[in-house]
Amino acid sequence: MDHNQSFADYEASALLAIAGALSAGDLEEVRIEYLGKKQGRLKDLQAVLGQVPPDQRPAVGMKFNAIKDRVTSAWESRKEQLAKPKQSESWIDVTLPGSRREIGSRHPLSQTIGEFKGIMARFGFDVEEGPEVEDEWHNFVALNIPDDHPARNPLDNFYLSVASSTNPEARLLRSQTSTVQIRTMEHRPPPVRIVSVGRVYRPDPVDATHHLMFHQMEGLMIGPDVTMSSLKTVLRLFAASYLGEGTVVRFRPSFFPFTEPSVEFDARRGTGWLELGGAGMVDPNVLRACGYDPEQVSGFAFGLGIARFCMMRHGITDIRHFYDNELRFLKQF
Ligand code: FA5
């Protein structure tokens, strides 16, 4: 056989045997067979070298040595590899629990808003939107809040600009979602059944139940024979749906310029009561300001504090938690 072929066969089968050795014992057998000095395949290969004509011997000898070196170094690196403990055995403990990746969740107020809209949709109420930056017409005038009413005091509102000769329209951050009642009636003919949810802004002193920015849900229902008892039924059903069947609620006579009669709506919390919202029958002046005929239609409206409901349901005692973005609080929802 040609010596080149013998060299190639030797190298290929030696490298295969080395790679296939799975233990130090296997590898020792391979060494004896392929690299043994007294007998074995290397000896056979040396015999092949002996048959090469003397003038070619130096070149073929170099080839022989190179092959021997390659096989020897493959054998040594396999030996080192087998001596090392297997990485997977030393540093992966497959019985340990995996590291959990933190994923966020929806803010409790967003969850509450979603539920509110869902409940009101089942009662047949559409959702309307309105801007947070308002003009005085929608925030006050059309809501029957006259110029000299204390609610219009600039110190009780977040004004962004005041009216002047060059700027006829003052702008402010809306102080209530009742602005959306007006916007809805301006573009929709009766009957109307809507809710609108969003942020409102008031420079109230911040405490456990008050914030400077908070969320309200406005409701408006206008039709040929909407009455105070329709209002009470909707609010009672709403409270039972969100807070649970056994929730005790009460209606207290109150005053709002845009409703007559007006009530405040509370739920029992422990031994006391928590005010959840204001409501009433839409004042005829408001209906007229929006182009509705109070002889033809009547309606009710309500404005609920969203965080207050969420506080009631989850036993949260301080409204500030909702706006602090403290993870320990947010993770409970
Ligand atoms: C109003 O805002 C009226 N627009 C409600 C209304 C609508 C009456 C339609 C009649 C018809 P009031 O200022 O009471 O009303 O606020 C309503 C609710 O918002 C309160 O009952 C309370 O739940 C919540 N609220 C009021 N002020 C704050 C505040 N500073 N922080 C958190 N929640 C508040």
Image (cartoon, rainbow, N blue to C red):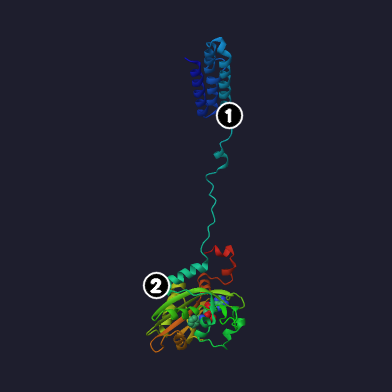
Residue 86 spot, x, y in % from top left? 56, 36
Number of numbered discs: 2
Residue under numbered circle 2: 122
Q: Nearer the viewer, residue 229 or 68?
A: 68
Task: Please give the name of the residue rendered at 51% of the width and 19% of the height, measured from the top-left corner.
Answer: 7
Residue 51 spot, x, y in % from top left? 52, 11
- Secondary element under disc 1, as helix, strand or loop, is helix
Q: Quadrant of residue 71?
A: top right
How far, Cα to Cα, is label 1 from label 2?
A: 74 Å
Q: Nearer the viewer, residue 104 or 178?
A: 178
Residue 111 spot, x, y in % from top left? 49, 67
- Secondary element under disc 2, as helix, strand or loop, is helix
Give the amino acid at mark 2. Arg
Q: Quadrant of residue 73?
A: top right
Q: Nearer the viewer, residue 232 or 325?
A: 325
Give the amino acid at mark 1. Ser
Residue 32 spot, x, y in % from top left? 54, 20
**Is residue 278 at least partly visible in the picture?**
no
Sequence order check: which comes first, mark 1 or mark 2? 1
Q: Is residue 291 left or right of residue 320?
A: left
Whether label 1 touches label 2, CB < 8 Å = no
88 lies above or below 124:
above
Task: Please give the name of the residue rendered at 46% of the width and 68% of the height, measured from the top-left corner.
Answer: 114
Residue under numbered circle 1: 77
Q: Is residue 191 left or right of residue 21?
A: left
